[in-house]
Image (cartoon, helix red, strand yellow):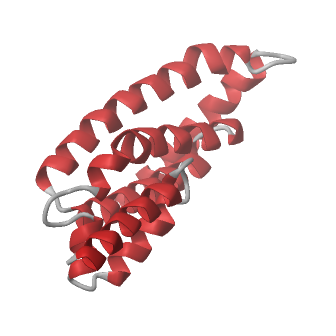
Amino acid sequence: MSKETFLYKFFRSAVKNACQMLMSLGIDSRCVYAEDFETPFLQQSAEFYRLESQKLLAENSASVYIRKVAARISEEAERAVHYLDKSTEERIIRVLEDELITKHIKTIVEMENSGVDHMLKHNKYEDLATMYKLFERVPSGHQTVADCMSNFLREQGKA
């Protein structure tokens, strides 16, 4: 085992143990863990991903953005399993879905030269499928894509 692998496993174990300790301090509740760790962690994560979403949207096409968002969600879910209490896993994923998808859903589908219209015009069906799969994670995600596709088809019918 390399030194780096050992340190990574040690760190992961230490963080997980610290979270478990905070949970046990709450005796019959998770109040110590929630107040001292989970709430600030989720707030800081929301701020981090709010800024990250702005940067990713400014620098990437819709196709690249949705792939990066899917990767971020997968990475964060993996970290949550290894580091956090089970109760926090779902909450951190909801933070990512809100900050990276829900708050920008209209911007993503309407991105000029890369949004849904562009994907349909240029037969980017794999990108559309990735978007559709990612958007199923949030309320009205599928409807947003369907509405854009419907508008595109109506416009094509008029042409």
Q: How many marks?
A: 0
40 and 117: which is toward the camera: 117
Q: Residue at x 70, y 37 (%)?
A: 87
Image quadrant occupied by the C terminus: bottom left
Does residue 43 lie above or below 115 as drawn? above
Q: Residue at x 63, y 31 (%)?
A: 19
Q: Quadrant of residue 88?
A: top right
Relative placement, left or right, of 135 versus 68 is right
Image quadrant occupied by the N terminus: bottom left
120 and 66: which is toward the camera: 120
Q: What is the x, y in percent for residue 23?
A: 72, 25
Q: Residue at x 54, y 53 (%)?
A: 77
Q: Quadrant of residue 71?
A: bottom left
Does residue 21 lie above or below 71 as drawn? above
Whether residue 5 appears in this view of the structure is: no
Q: Residue furthest bottom?
A: 123
Q: What is the x, y in percent for residue 91?
A: 60, 37
132 and 54: which is toward the camera: 132
Relative placement, left or right, of 23 versus 154 is right
Q: Residue furthest front?
A: 158
Does residue 31 lie above or below 88 as drawn? above
Q: Residue at x 40, y 67 (%)?
A: 150
Q: What is the x, y in percent for residue 133?
A: 50, 68
Q: What is the x, y in percent for residue 38?
A: 57, 25
152 and 54: which is toward the camera: 152
Whether residue 52 appears in this view of the structure is: yes
